[in-house]
Image (tube, coloured by chain):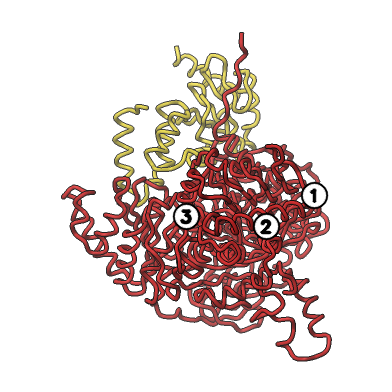
Chain colours: A yellow, B red
Amino acid sequence: MRFSDQFEKRFAEMLTHYPTKRSVLVPTLLYAQDEAGFLSDEVIAEIAQRLELTELDVNNVISYYSMLTTKPRGKYNVQVCTNIACMLRGGEELLEQCKDRLGIGHKGTTSDGLFSLEEVECIGACSWAPAIQVNYDFHENLDERKMDAVLDSYRKKAI
Amino acid sequence: MADAPKLVNLTVDGKKLTAPAGSLLIDACKNVGIEVPSFCYYPNLSLQGACRMCLVRVEKMPKLQTACTTVVAEGMVVATDNEEIKQARKAMVELLLGNHPLDCPVCDAGGECELQDMTFSYGAAESKYMEPKNHKDEQQWSPVVFFDRPRCILCYRCVRVCGEGMDVWALGVQNRGVSSIIAPNKEDHLECEECGMCIDICPVGALTSGAYRYKTRPWEMNHVGTTCAHCADGCKTTLGVRRADEGMEIVRGDNRDKSGINNDFLCMKGRYAFDFANHEDRLTQPLIRKNGKLTPSTWEEAFELVGKKLNEVRMRDGGSAIGVIGSTHTTNEENYLLQKFARAVLESNNIDHHRTADFPALAAVLSGKQEITASMRDVYNAPAILLIGNDPTEQHPLLAWQIRNNVRLHGAKLHIINSEPIKLRRQATSFTQIPVGAELNAASFLAGDDSALNAITASASRENWAALRNQLRNTENLVIIFGSEIRGAAVTAVTHLASSISGAKVIALADYANSRGASDMGLYPDLLPGYHPAAKSGLTLPQMAENAKSGKLKALYVVGSNPLARFHLDSQIFAGTFVVVQDMFLTETATIADVVLPAANLYEKTGTITNTCGDVQIVKKASEVNGPKSDFEMIVRIADAMGYDVRNLVPFGRGETADMGQSRGAQSGEADRHAVWLQANNLEPKLSPFDPMAIFDEIQRLVPGYRVSRLNLLSGNDEHTQLSQSGPGAKHDPALIVPAHDNLFSSGTLGRYSRALNSVMENRNPQPAEVAAD
């Protein structure tokens, strides 16, 4: 299993921040997922071995956090907030619109591997509700028209 | 010694009480009889605070506090029982029952379920939840572990006991919140030591045992506290028995009452491998070889034949033409009786057993000196432990548990010297790997012989060895534990090291349930009970085989032993020998016998056994298979058939410490009532020649180390015997020791007849599926 030099640099540095190795597990998983797209058995085994944990232990932590996944996602992971502020301002309608336009449901991935869809709890963008998060980017104050534009822009980006 | 902990004063429910500073509120309450309910709190495991059942009101604290995580403080005022708390508990139980199926009438835990008890005590009769309960089908995680997910209340006890207690870490928790589940380490199954601690500790019926599930209900069994029949650690076990067609059947083994040296610990063998007792291959009637074939016979015919033949040989060729091989699985009383029978009735000193540790050498060093043998309890409390040889995780599961938990809970220092990287090194302060067979060198060096190191180490690591020696020499109350690698001269070296350290103690590790007892009771050609030298030395086991080969051994009496398999003897050499075998099964040795007498096992009789540390414990009759007799009875009956006055063998009816009520006053009827009491407590009045306690009287009188509290022993507690009061011991050929090399899932001949052990073995090493011939 090979990670990028940047990952290795970050990993080595993080280890110096904590008294125990297992403390760096969550950020390490996140960085590994950013590189590999998802946490494969191979990645899990590698990280478990590096941090002297059992694979069961690593799996337990992964299963706790919804942002970590052991299954491949699309290139763009569309996360629609339907928590209270977004819901009042049309979040649920946005989710329905995404389902309709992408042809997939919650936790689904399009057949071309471009988009995944996820209904999420609060993403901390209540002031600009309704909001969605695509990978690490936010799109705020959305309505039906703007939502379509956002999806189109990612489609174009992919070509 | 550390100073006694400071005490703090607190008030609970208006009661003033004191508790050691640093102790938990839940324990402080429990100690004065105030019940604070809990699921997730378990003594000696890390705190979880998950179940919220132990909520109490502490004055000046904002919310209800969990008593299991609150440390007592001076002046604390606590309420554990008011409307607010009742309401909180009721709500907690209601939440726990949200998805919990109400299948108590079929659940294994029904009747001894903590959730059931809590619901009766604290719960509500009805639930506000209208939603359907989540259901998941049960899963089989291993041959012995089943998981019923909906019953799980997520107390995490199993996860903690597996990780912290066993150092196996095979269980975890996946997902989050309401969808959390207990998960095994290999996706859909477990890869672990199969100890069953997770099942035992489960407060509900979520984890159930393959051996026991859906077989019976707790209140339909008799529960008998006895001692495990497998390895030499001597765990106390409570066997659940119920009536079966062929007698009394054991359906469960556990130690939930936490009595005995093992607390609630049991390994795979103690918990499940009692099933050899009800194996269909059990012999139930005597077999006599007629026309070359073993043919069923009556007991009368068998005893008559054995008595006649043994008498013939004794008259014609003398006692020296008769050999006796004793057992490491029979009681002390049977072993004592067997050597007495050999020496007094057969007039032969040719008696031996399968030796797995050099106890005579240890007795030789300790005889008449200060007592320095450690008990199994000492292993849990010692500040430091030196382990030379052996792999306790595999061969002595309780010892390994004691060591691990001493390190974890008391910060003991563990030093290991071994030729293999054994698992316990994970708890070790220092681990020194040595070449195979170099244990004597290591021991000699530690005892002070610098030159002993030359053969086993490069000069570079000499400093480490010297440092280890220095450190050990300065460790007061060190417990030194050594495997059978340490024999003869090495035993002397280790004991010298121990006696040079203030308070140090030793433990020699043998392999079978009563290996120590067989040794203490004089199953040696040159040693009587208590390691006193015999007037004339007889033949060792290999010498008996030699004599059989040359036609000099005319008769061989084998009690609960399988020398043909253990010592790889050629069955042909016994062609001219009259062989009598007492055993449960038709073992390799039994198949060549002239007479086979079906024997009862340790779970089917009463007596005492001694574990490898020298802790003597009682075994009580739990189960029964119709047909077999105890070895004790058979020995007496053979003596009788030989025309010997059995009163000279078993001093029944006039025991030295027998108590038929006379010690409690001359009130009329007292003796009768006492007999009733004895029966009710599974003790036997000594009125028959088959009463083992009559022989135990004699053992206590003649084997000085065994003068222990009889009362304590009969109450089911362990009593440490002393080796230093015994005779001078002996120096034997180290080659006479043949280690059993059993592991967690094997147990000599017993293990071969245990379905539970075999199923685990098969699960681990699946046979390749047969391929079609085309």
The percent position of residue B217, horizontal first and vertical second, equals 79, 53
Q: Is residue B378 left or right of residue B749?
A: left
Disc 1 designates what residue?
Answer: B246
Sequence-wise, which precedes: disc 2 or disc 1? 1
- Tag 2 secondary structure: helix
Query: Subunit of mark 1?
Result: B
Sequence-wise, which precedes: disc 2 or disc 3? 3
**Vertical position of residue B195 compared to residue B408: above or below:** above
- Give the spatial CA distance, label 3 vs label 1: 34 Å
Res. B694 image quadrant: bottom right
Query: Subunit of mark 2?
Result: B
The percent position of residue B201, horizontal first and vertical second, equals 63, 55
- Tag 3 secondary structure: loop
Q: Residue at x 43, y 69 (%)?
A: B373
Circle 3 crowding by C-alpha within 10 Å: few under 14, some 14–19, many from 20:
many
Disc 2 designates what residue?
Answer: B603
**Which residue is outermost to the front?**
B316
- Tag 1 secondary structure: loop
Circle 1 crowding by C-alpha within 10 Å: few under 14, some 14–19, many from 20:
few
Depth check, front residue: B243 or B21: B243
Q: Are marks 2 and 1 in contact (CB under 8 Å)?
A: no
> Which numbered mark, 3 or 1, is in the foreground of this view?
3
The percent position of residue B762, horizontal first and vertical second, equals 59, 34
Checking the image for residue B355, the label placed there is 3
Quadrant containing the N terminus of chain B in the rendered view = bottom left
Depth check, front residue: B9 or B281: B281
**Vertical position of residue B621 compared to residue B694: above or below:** above
Sequence-wise, which precedes: disc 3 or disc 1? 1
For residue B600, say whether it is visible: yes
Q: Residue at x 61, y 84 (%)?
A: B16
